[in-house]
Amino acid sequence: MGILFYFPEQRQLEFRFPDSSRRLRRLYSNFSERQLKVYLQSFSEWVARANKELYPELTLEGYEVLLRHSLLDADATVLRFAPTVKAVPHSAHIGTLLDHYYDLYFSEAYAPPLHERTRDEGFLLSQFRNSIKHLDPGAAKLLKKDVEISVPATSVIFDYAWQNGTFNLVKPISFDLKNENEIHKKALFYYGNLNLLADKAKENQYRFDILVARPTNPKLSREYNRAVSILKKIDAPSSFIVEDEELQEYSKIAARNLREHYKPTDTGLFLPTFDN
């Protein structure tokens, strides 16, 4: 029902589980899917806290002891963690490894195989938001959504925004396309629209944070590099976050600043400390 990962070099825990429990529903007529989701979500939240608060200097053996005492006692529920299995990573990117093992264990029963998933703008936004949720589940709820920036010549809706001295506007642009012409046309389109917002971005301390997906086809790498160089010519404060390791690091920075730049109200909600 779930996989717990420990990356010793990064000293980082990650927990992955499927959204659906349909396989168990078919096996057991009295199966409580709601209770299982409560357990799995609590594991995910514990892991997010552990990465920030609980003894990051511990060895793998130390974490195993910690898990038995703090996460799931041997006789606490019918759930059990299997013995730890060590593996040699085939990629330096944590996100790639997590996707690979999720696909290996769960795709046949719960989701389409990884190679069938489209790495489009929705994929990039999901990767960004899920990375924040695993780091700090509450921080993801503080992202400002669908922020529209307008000038007389154009208007652009940014999917997410967050604050850390500048107002960071998140726009995903996937170049996982079929041919060079599509990649080139897409780069020019976004260059034109975002460049029209450049003066307003400078005046209001906006920054364009562009999440980028590479083409799956390695033959399109040259055109992809050309597309990124076009976007880097936008005359406005901007940063380019490519998927995998750069997106993971960007998500950590965003999660931390979402907490720092929001303040609790009397109702227990969070309000932004900036105006837009």
Image (cartoon, helix red, strand yellow):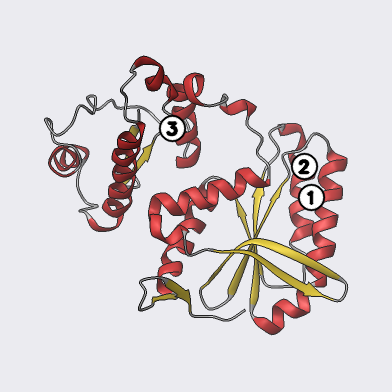
- Residue 120 image position (x, y, % from top left): 68, 42
Residue at the image position 40 percent from the left and 49 percent from the top: 134
Residue 72: image quadrant is: top left
For this rendering, which residue is in front, 29 or 15?
A: 29
Q: Secondary structure at mark 1?
A: helix
Q: Amino acid at mark 2?
A: Arg
The span from disc 1 to disc 3 (Cα, nearest Å) is 37 Å
- Percent across and percent down for residue 37 are 35, 38
Question: Which element carries disc 2, helix, strand or loop?
Answer: helix
What residue sits right under mark 1 in the picture? 226
Amino acid carrying label 3: it is Pro
State which tag comes first along the sequence, 1 or 3: 3
Residue 4 seen by the camera: no
First in sequence, mark 3 or 2: give its number.
3
Q: Position of residue 130 (x, y in %)?
A: 48, 48
Tell me the element at label 3: loop
Left or right: 199 as drawn, with respect to 16 = right
Q: Which residue is mark 3?
A: 18
Decide: few, some or many residues near mark 1? Use Cα within 10 Å; few <14, some 14-19, many ≥20.
some
Q: Residue lying furthest top in this view?
A: 27
